[in-house]
Each structure stands twice: as C-alpha cells, then as structure tokens.
Amino acid sequence: MKIKDLSINGRTFLAPLAGITNLPFRLLVKECGCGVVCSEMVSAKGIFYNSEKTLNLLSSKKIEQPLSVQLFGSDPDSMAKGASFVQDLNVAGIIDINFGCSVKKVVKQGAGVALMQEPELSKTILTAVRKAIDLPLTIKIRSGWDHSGQQAFKIAQIAQDAGVNAIAMHPRTASQGFKGTANWDLIAKLKQQLSIPVIGNGDINTVEDAQKMITDTGCDAVMVGRAAMKNPFILAQIDDFLASGSYKRSSNYEIFRTMERLTRMYVTYFGEKPACKMLRGRLSWFIKGMPGCSAFRRNLSCISSENHILTLIKEFETALV
Ligand SMILES: Cc1cc2nc3c(=O)[nH]c(=O)nc-3n(C[C@H](O)[C@H](O)[C@H](O)COP(=O)(O)O)c2cc1C
C-alpha cells in the first residue's frame, strides 16, 4: 500500500490515542510489529506558540518511522504553519489532521469533529496545509453528527479534491463518543466513493475482526486503538494473518517481558516518578482477565519505583505458574 509516495509495510495503523500513543508506547508497538504508528494529537496552536508541552509530543526516534503526526486545530494559518514546522523537524512520514476528536475542549475551539460541520473551513485548512507540505497528508474522520454518514462523505470528497492522500474513518457519530457500535457499512461506502486509500477503524478487537473489516468493506488498511492498548502485538498478528492466514498468539512470557519493557521505556523517557504515576493505570490492561489481575491492579496504585514495578510483575508471573 502506498500513501502518496510512501510505501507502507503491511496494512496496519496504530490509532492516535491521546495520553497513550506517546513515544515509549509507539516504540513498543513498533518493536512488536506494525505498519504505521500515530502520535497523540498535537495542537497546531501549541506549536505556533512554542509550548514546551506540545513540542515534547513531537519527540520521535528513527526506528518508529514512518510516524504519522496528528495535528488538531481550526485556524488555517496555524495549521499550515504547524504542519510545515513538523515537516521541517524531520520526524514525520505522514501528517494527519484530526476531524474526529469529540472531546469538549477540542470541539469548543472548532477543531476535531467540529470541522465536519464546516466544509468551507475544512477545505481552506486542507488546501493551506497541502500547500505548506510535501509529506503525505491524511485525515481521520468520524461519520459526522448524525448516522447518515453524509458529513463524512462530503468532507472526504473535499479532502481528496484538496490533495489529501488517504482517509481513516472511525464510523461513529460525534455524539456517540465510544458508545454503540462502529458502522462499518459507512467505511465500505467511503471506499467506493474515493480513489485514495481508505483506512478502516473502530471496534477491531481481534485479529479476525480486522480480516472481517477488510473483507466486508474493501478498506485498504485497518487502524487499531483500544485493542492495541491491551495487546501491542495485535497489529503484527493482523499483518501475519492477512499475509499467511495464521498468526502466533502472544505467550504469557512475552506479555510479561512486554510489561517490563514498557516500564523501562517509560522510566527512561519520562523519569521514574512520573513514569510510576502513568503506569498505575496502564500495566493492568496487559493482564486483564488473568487470575489475580484485580489484586495486581490494586498493588499498582502504590508503585513508587521501577524496581517496585518489576518486582510486582515478577511476583504476578510466578504466581501464575
Ligand atoms: C484514550 C483514547 C484517546 C484517543 N485519542 C485520539 C486522538 O488523539 N486522535 C484521534 O483522532 N482519535 C483519538 N481517539 C480515537 C481512536 O483513535 C479510535 O478512533 C477509536 O478508539 C476507535 O478505534 P478502536 O475501536 O480501535 O479503539 C482516542 C481514543 C481513545 C480511547
């Protein structure tokens, strides 16, 4: 699969997940195997105003390439300048524009999914960003405000006409948030409408779900979010399954090594104290459903050092066998 002149290895994208797809997590998923990893959403205004917090989100490492950096905003000028800034940093293989975030503070500034109600402004933004960068440009949309998908089809057409190179669709409405189910029929319809690649997203919980989405919708690639938070191997497993019809399930041994690896990477990247705080809510996802996971989750609430975390993981692993 190609997005503009960029060849993508495999057919999998790690979805952008604010607060989750930071550099350590992306590196972990990339190590497990994945076509493209996406950054958390980055504020174009934050780049414009040189916000340290925003610029930190743009940290990257060569091995995670091609990295898709997602920008959000509603002002054409700062979006174009932000995109150009990111291109000049040389960290991104793709620039993605967020048309899907339904979080209040984003929608309030007219960004994210709010743009889906503003076709003229969307056209101005995309035209300005396209003019500002040579990198492959993608957008990530929802189905719109109501269930018809009409806003998605309209914005997608505007995007394709403005020179956008691929579109990811999460077919839930703005008001749905994450409730209900993603309407994959809309992905199939979008695929029929567009000549650029369509990336299907929403409710892929298993490898088999990914295969089903591709079969049912004809989408060119799949994007996985929440399932990758629990199983960072899932994207590699999907690519293996699509290529060969089989895949290797991750063993408990691999899961525990992955938890240790993420812990170490978090500590290296964020520092021990902040890493411990962040990992409290994070590590238990990997072992959800295993006997004793509730007690493990409770123990995580008081972790205070890297060694403490590694000991808890080892104890949990030993108790399992
Ligand atoms: C915690 C969290 C953070 C998210 N952050 C973003 C984001 O920054 N940008 C974006 O376009 N979508 C964001 N999303 C939406 C996901 O990218 C994805 O579209 C959604 O989770 C549906 O896919 P899934 O069923 O594979 O999780 C977020 C979702 C979650 C759960």
Image (tube, rainbow, N blue to C red):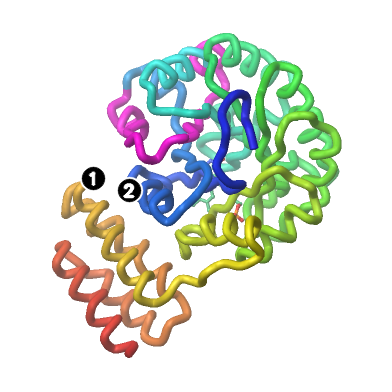
- The residues tagged by marks 1 and 2 sit, at their Cα atoms, a distance apart of 7 Å
Q: Is residue 148 left or right of residue 287?
A: right
Query: Does the magenta-highlighted stretch encompass residue 299?
Result: no
Q: Is residue 114 above or below residue 50?
A: below
Mark 1 vs 2: CB contact within 8 A? yes
Q: Residues within 10 Å of mark 1 (few under 14, many from 20)?
A: some
In the rendered image, which residue does mark 2 sit on? 24
Mark 1 or 2, nearer chain start: 2
Residue 141 on image: x %, y %: 67, 37
**SS class, disc 1:** helix
* Residue 43 against residue 273 in the figure, above or below: above
Residue position marked by numbered label 1 in the rendering: 269
Q: Where in the figure is residue 234, as x and y percent of width and height? A: 52, 61
- Mark 2: secondary structure: helix
Q: Residue at x 55, y 17 (%)?
A: 75
Identify which residue, 15 or 197, lies in the foreground. Answer: 197
Above or below, 147 against 210 in this view is above
Point out the residue furthest to the front here. 244
- Residue depicted at x 30% and y 32%: 56
